[in-house]
Image: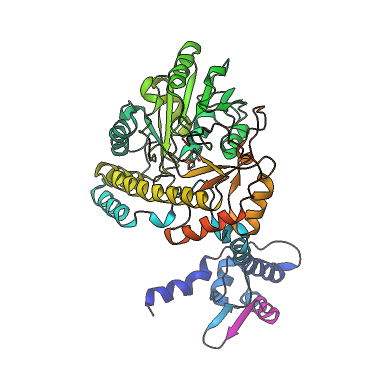
Amino acid sequence: MDESWVNSAERIGADLHLELSGPGGRRAALIRALREAVRDGRLTPGTRLPAYRSLAADLGVARNTVADAYAELVAEGWLTARQGSGTRVAERAKPLRPAVEARRRASPRARGPRHDLRQGTPDASAFPRAEWLTSYRRALQQAPNEVFGPGDPAGRVELREALTEYLARARGVRTEPGRIVVCSGFAHALRLLFGQGGGGALSGPLAVEAYGLGFHRELLDTAEVRTVPLPLDERGARTDLLGRERAVLLTPAHQFPTGGPLDPARRAAVVGWARARGAVILEDDYDGEFRYDRKPVGAVQGLDPERVIYLGSVSKSLSPALRLGWMVLPERYVDGVLAAKGEREAWASVPDQLALADFLSRGSYDRHVRRMRQRYRARRDRLVAALATHAPHVRVTGVAAGLHAVLGLPPGTERSTVKAAAWQGVALDGLAEFRHPATDMAAHDGLVVGYATPSEHAYGAAVEALCGILPPDDGPPDDAPGSTRTGT
Ligand SMILES: Cc1ncc(COP(=O)(O)O)c(C=O)c1O
């Protein structure tokens, strides 16, 4: 065995922090403190305790006090004492933490469903490990030492430059590195913009699409931002109904979750509204790269960079685990957002930022997105074909782009279908999950089916299971909100 390891293991006890307090004298206090340390996992099974003499010196107690305490805990089964191997924490003295961890791992959420058709995650098995590693290695090799000190809250300039080029080319975003602030994703961007209980660069009321991600609404609620739902129709959000709100949050390239793009006339109109009212548009471009059989829809930001805050992240394109995102800001918001971030980068790992900069500037990001676009398009086609064969009465919409589809269901069947799905080990969400509680637009029954989450080998079985839980043909299908009959 490595000698240095033995030594450090032997020394572990010397650094053990024990508070001797409470009734019953030093011996009782030491017994309590050691028992507590084992119970809460600070002393793990097998750990060798310090010799009597050294712990006694550390704690300022008599050697016999330590010897008595150890003997008591050996008798109780917390410790073991063997000739030649000293006193150790007993193997069967299970600390609390592993028990909690075991419980957490055993929970249904941690175990995950048999077939995961929830929207929200890309195919984790397709993360480009080798290319990311190459970029990471290159980034570390070339990084100046300052990279390993406190980070600039704006983000590394290398990343902001690479994003400026990429977003202009791929998404029609007009900006320069000085207006980009790196963050840890869209949710973080919302927190930075609205602050907690006020104090952010923006304040409400904020118009939002009547269907959207509940998590984002909760986050805004926590920040005490009142959200006003905008109804949707087949042309996207009813931006013509915008009134006195200070800002609007939209998913113009691919309405989340119903799936269509915002109508071109409405894109122009919403910019007109923002100019006229001195308001701002928050553009959530969460999966703009993934479009299949329609022309790319560029960012609304390109229409007026001073009226739009453009928000993006790698959560759909690479992985939500990286926690890397960006805000492209009108000039007047840059200082406020940087102030909200604080003096040092506290969110987005700087080496990761450099790796992403390399990944973008060497074309690896483009290659990965193209590869994934093909993969997701094939999955989308497979889903649509399976439904056409096994459930032709189910209308599929929102499939021209993105990583999920919406399946219209007969009225009144959504809740029971989601339950039946869960029963069969198929995880997916009903449309109601995404509905703003205050909207009065007509509700439609439907399922939001994410087709990116399963790995390639698990996908076929997931689609088969999905077809098995859909309600039978029972009259005309219900249209999903914002859907069109052409399946945009
Ligand atoms: C509607 C929507 N916006 C934004 C995001 C990205 O969120 P984040 O960057 O916080 O992971 C997601 C999820 O990936 C989403 O579904």
In the image, 465 versus 91, the foreground residue is: 465
**Residue 242 in sight from this viewpoint:** no
Number of numbered discs overlaid on the protein picture: 0
Whole-percent x, y for residue 316 in the image: 43, 44
296, above or below 30, in the image: above
- Is 276 magenta? The answer is no
Q: Position of residue 7 (x, y in %)?
A: 43, 74
Magenta extent: 68-82
Q: Is residue 71 magenta?
A: yes
Residue at far top of view: 276
Q: Nearer the viewer, residue 123 or 486?
A: 486
Q: How is the image coloured?
A: rainbow
Residue at 47% from the left image edge and 19% from the top image edge: 270
Q: Please, which residue is most extreme toward the right here?
A: 23
Would you say residue 245 is visible in this rendering?
Answer: yes
Which residue is depicted at the point 73% across and 61% down? Answer: 22
Q: Is residue 415 above or below residue 23?
A: above
Q: Position of residue 312 (x, y in %)?
A: 42, 36
**Residue nearest the viewer, comparing 29 with 371:** 371
